Image: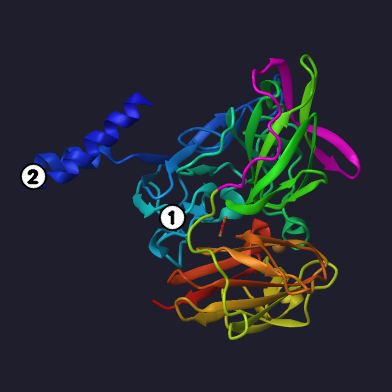
Amino acid sequence: MICRRTLLKTGASLAALPLLPGRLHAEVALTPVIEARVAQAQIAPEGYPQTEVWSFDGKLPGPEIRARQGSRLTRKLVNALTAPTSVHWHGIRIDNAMDGVPGVTQQAVQPGQTFLYDFDLPDAGTYWYHSHNQSYEQVARGLHGPLIVEERDAPDVDRDVTLMLDDFRLDPETGQIAGFDNMHDFSHGGRIGNITLTNGTFNKNLQTRQNERLRLRLINVATARIFTLNVQGLDGWIMALDGMPLEAPRPLNEPMLLAPAQRIDLIVDISAEEGDAAHLVRMERDEAFSQVLIEVRGVSASRPRGTPDPLPPNPDMVVTRLDDALQSHLRMDGGAMRGFASARMAGQEVSFREAAENGQFWAFNGMVGMPEAPLLVAERGQTVRVTLQNDTMFPHAMHLHGHHFREIHADGTLGPLRDTLLMFGDERREIAFVASNPGDWVFHCHMLAHAASGMMTRIKVLA
Ligand code: C2O
Ligand code: CU
């Protein structure tokens, strides 16, 4: 901690000096690095072998990056892998050039090469970063980590805990990650793991005291699994979704769905008695599993504090002028059981079978994979409405880069700000957002095998 502060201070004073050759060298050396590299992790229970993962800084998940709202984040990505990679800063209203999407905002960073990410953090909240190159494989191998942007006025909690929920598919014999060419995953629900993890371990536990107040930042970094979560032994409130504060905390009284890439910030008060346990519970087909065991040892001085105040809102997040909005439509089709009659793929008309032979199974508006033309082109500041029609049998987690949107409910009311929308089969939903951030922004399914097999488009916001 002290070490980091010293570095920052030194960096600032150097920046103010004229760039003499010697000093320039010193300044470059101070740029914080994030290195993508192979590492070993004990994912499977004790007694099983370690698993080779792809990591940021040798850690699974990658190091927690914490920064203040309004500050600038600088990281030099060093690619020490044997494959090209990149970093996408998920949920940040970022400068387009820093969005980390190879082929759209930058070139993939080749092995041995570096890329300097340097951008402002306009919003507080819970975000994450992950590879955006071959991401169905690279994220599943471990290239992800939390990015926490702290409020200027942080809520009064005893502890602030990030919980990255994940799953891995390990070969039961070798304990290694295997099977990325499974066409069943691409055409069905994506790659679902056979071991469920929190912060890289299957038996995550926390030690607390009765009446302690915790902020829990839940992040689903799995590439396909939708977590259904509940709590036990604590009173809680949902404070924020996908980083963005709710206007009023929502008491936790029913299970929460957390789709891939989504986040939920909770504030919880431990109500379980000393010596007892509380849990973050994962529901699977009506069975309950302890995802995080929260041991209660001792009693905190604090008393239950009742409903917390809402988190401070982030700046300029309004949706206005719904009436003269730019209107767009996205129809999703394909996948197992339904397929599509025909679609365009790489400039050619193909049947579902022809697409499938190329490992492609899904289409947006009849286009497989990234289309030549954007889904829509918006003026900067224009309000955009997109109806999303899921004509497939599968759920999808639609993520828009660079912006947060609100759902327009059937009754005309607006939902909370989100960057990832979970849609079930045959659902039709509508979202609206202000196209405030210039650039080309990808819009894709965050079930990453789906994105890799057709579910990818982009929008353009004019400067
Ligand atoms: Cu979290 Cu396009 O990604
Ligand atoms: Cu999908």
Query: Would you say 336 lies left or right of 9 here?
Result: right
Q: Quadrant of residue 204?
A: top right
Secondary structure at numbered mark 1: loop
Q: Quadrant of residue 455?
A: bottom right
Is 189 situated above or below 379? above
Give the residue at mark 1: 122
Query: Would you say 290 lies left or right of 130 here?
Result: right
Residue 127 drawn at (x, y percent):
54, 48
Q: Is mark 2 within 8 Å of ligand 1?
A: no
Give the residue at mark 2: 20
Asked whether 371 or 306 is in front, the reply is: 306
Is 267 situated above or below 459? above
Residue 212 drawn at (x, y percent):
66, 25
Q: Which residues are magenta?
A: 282-311
Is 269 situated above or below 459? above
Q: CA distance from mark 1 to mark 2?
A: 32 Å
State the quadrant of the N terminus.
top left
Query: Would you say 357 lies left or right of 310 here?
Result: right
State the quadrant of the C terminus.
bottom left
The amino acid type of the residue labelled 2 equals: Leu
Q: Where is ligand 2, by quadrant?
A: bottom right
Residue 272 drawn at (x, y percent):
79, 23
Asked whether 254 or 27 is in front, the reply is: 254
Residue 285 visible in the snapshot: yes
The amino acid type of the residue labelled 1 equals: Pro
Asked whether 110 or 102 is in front, the reply is: 102
The stretch drawn in magenta includes residue 216: no
